Image: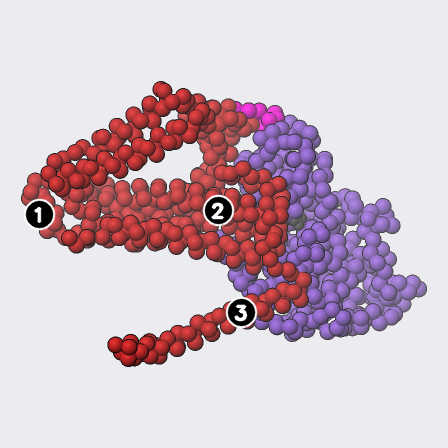
Chain colours: A red, B purple
Amino acid sequence: MNLKNFKIDLKNKKRLIPQVLTISFIIFVIAYFSYNAQINMGNRGISFGYGFLSQEASFDITFSMIDYDGSYSYGRAFLVGLLNTLLVSIIGIILCTVLGVTIGIGRLSQNYLIAKAAEWYVEIFRNIPLLLQIFFWYYGALRLLPLPENAISFSDISYLTIKGWYVPKFIWTNFSIFLSSVVVSIFAIFYVFNYAKKQREEIGKHVPAGFISLGIIIILPMITFLVGGVSLNFQYPELNQLSDTVYNFKGGVSIIPELISLALALSMYTATFVAENVRAGIEGVGKGQKEAAASIGLTRGQILKLVVMPQALRIIIPPTTNQYLNLTKNSSLAAAIAYPDIVLVFAGTALMQTGRAIEIISITMGTYLFLSLTISVLMNSYNKKMAIKEK
Amino acid sequence: MIKSIKTWILVGFASLLLVACGQSGGGAGSKKSKTLENTKKAGFVKCGVSQGLPGFSNADASGNWTGIDVDVCRAVAAAVLGDADKVKYTPLSAKERFTALTSGEIDVLARNTTWTLSRDADIGLTFVGVNFYDGQGFMVRKNSGINSVSDFKNGISACTNTGTTTELNMRDFFNSKNISYEPIAFEKADEVVQAYDAGRCDTYTTDKSGLAAQRTKMSNPDEHKVLPETISKEPLGPVVRQGDAVWEDIVRWSLNTMIEAEEYGINSSNASSLKDSENPAIKRLVGSEGELGAAFGLDNEWSLRIIEQVGNYGESYKKHIADTGILPNRGPNQLWTKGGILYVPPAR
Ligand SMILES: N[C@@H](CCC(=O)N[C@@H](CS)C(=O)NCC(=O)O)C(=O)O
């Protein structure tokens, strides 16, 4: 017994040696390079260190989701940039998924017009470089919008101008109570779905989980308004004169044109790839499956939802994960149109003001790596859930 | 993106270079200059300029660079290589400029760059002098009814370049006036101009020289004006990498030569005829007395070539800044002998 084990160990060791050697070599190279870099930076009077992160940034940022102004630190500026990157990526991912799925299904439509339109969409937006599309939206489309005094008004509650899209500001009282009711609703919905599944599998009874959930998510938060002391007021944007010819909107929230153009360009571009994945996924489900489903009397909608999609998703998800990753990385094109993402704010302005190139670029690369890996992990676990479970 | 990729590559380059050069960098005190040797070997001066700022560094349709910043590089080329045209220009955004210099992509940065303590002391750079005394100002539309910075109100949006002193001064200024403002910072000057021109922002702020120069690029220059106030000091000057004292001196004294030449009335057309002037200061500048060039390993005609091929500071200013209508008045950029603050140490 012992002897046997020993033999196996020896075998493993033989295989281990080249690996250990390779790893030590890599470590040696990295150590050598860092050591040299340090000495040379020293020679050139460049210091190295991450201490600057706590220094005052002293530059302002157009748009931030957390409290920030120049009196905060570079570390805080990094966070502002990171959150802005996340914001545009999340908006982009949601929009591109909705758009991509619609177009992907549209391409398979029996309606010639819809199918052709979807095909054209994909061909056009996939083949124009993304940067150009960003420029198109920013310098082309959004720059044609009127000045605030001639704003395009949406029933006087929301205004579209060259300086941005002004929407009403939500002013909550007891927002936390409202938020908890939403969280509770979501848990309740999970429970309902589980229950419906059990009922279906065990006694074959159909529970209208969708309707019930809709009811929960509407009614429960409503109750907090009635008895929980929650209230929501809107502060509407108002035209405000700054000088003879200079106007802006006061009150309300301004969605800056830089964010709008970037989100539009990213999602419309990425949607083409998502659409192609969706199409491939649906087409990848055997024809026999659909015919079998039709023969037991399922409607077209039911076939898509119950038979085709669950199988198609397994084909769709892996390449779509890639597209989400691409979208996130592509959001760094923000710098071209002054959207304050992590590259513009941190790898741009902060780098320039501090001169800490190596430190800042390493942090930024690390951040993107972390974001990518996180998305991958999330999507992989979703994919696992979707995979066929052998019973 | 193209730009930011470039920055990343430059940074990569910087780190590689730091590694590659080993410990062999020309230390202070040694008479040898690695940069000088490399420049002679390459046959051109590697010069970083702006991406197009009329009067300072601007390329015409056929790619010829002109401007008073460009003339600093031309002066170095004339001194070192004997020909002012032997310069390779690299256009850089404000954000890229210092990385390009520390990484060795360029050897001289002549790009309307403000001399500040942290830039000089903290990031491996050395400023060699000032070739334009400037200050930050604001541009607004003439019909805006804004006639001075005291007319600014809460909510005003201001466009500028990212990675500049401008961005920092702007904050100091609005803070001190207690005005809330929307800052929009673009990487390229042209993007700022376009944004301001289209109405994305209400005011455009940068160095006053920059405002005057960029105004010429607007769709209708007459519709805009520069407010009278100056909110900062912006001494603009050429920059070199830290650690090569000889190269630093060459660039410094190339600029000084142009300024001192004007002081002594030496210009591109009379320089060679002044070789046997009565005045020893003039004779030193045109190379007929003393051995000044030897101090940094150059021949004795280095300064004569600068004056002959590039001209003195006054000629350069007149040609690029005054005659082009950018800033006809020299203001502080006049010799100290004529009421300005241009004052350089003597070449002797
Ligand atoms: N002097 C300031 C600002 C320099 C700056 O970049 N100014 C802009 C506006 S005048 C510019 O030169 N842009 C030209 C370009 O981007 O090529 C500094 O050194 O930070």
- Which quarter of the rendered picture does the C terminus of chain B lie within? bottom right
Give the residue displayed 62% in from the left and 28% down from the top: B153
Q: Measure the alpha-carbon separation of dots 1 and 3.
A: 63 Å
Residue B48 pos. (x, y %)? 63, 59
Could you tell which of marks 3 and 2 lies nearer the N-terminus?
3
In the image, A154 versus A358, the foreground residue is: A358
Local crowd size for mark 3, using a 10 Å CA cut-off: few (<14), some (14–19), many (≥20): few
Q: Residue A292: give its label.
A: 1
Q: How many marks?
A: 3
Q: Residue A31: give its label.
A: 3
In the image, B149 versus A214, the foreground residue is: A214
- Comparing marks 1 and 3, which lies closer to the viewer? 3
Q: Residue furthest front?
A: A2
Label 3 residue SS? helix
Question: Is residue B103 placed above or below A274 in the rendered structure?
Answer: below
Give the residue displayed 31% in from the left and 32% down from the top: A185
Relative horizontal placement of residue B108, taking residue A126 as reference (left or right): right
Q: Which chain is indicated by disc 1?
A: A
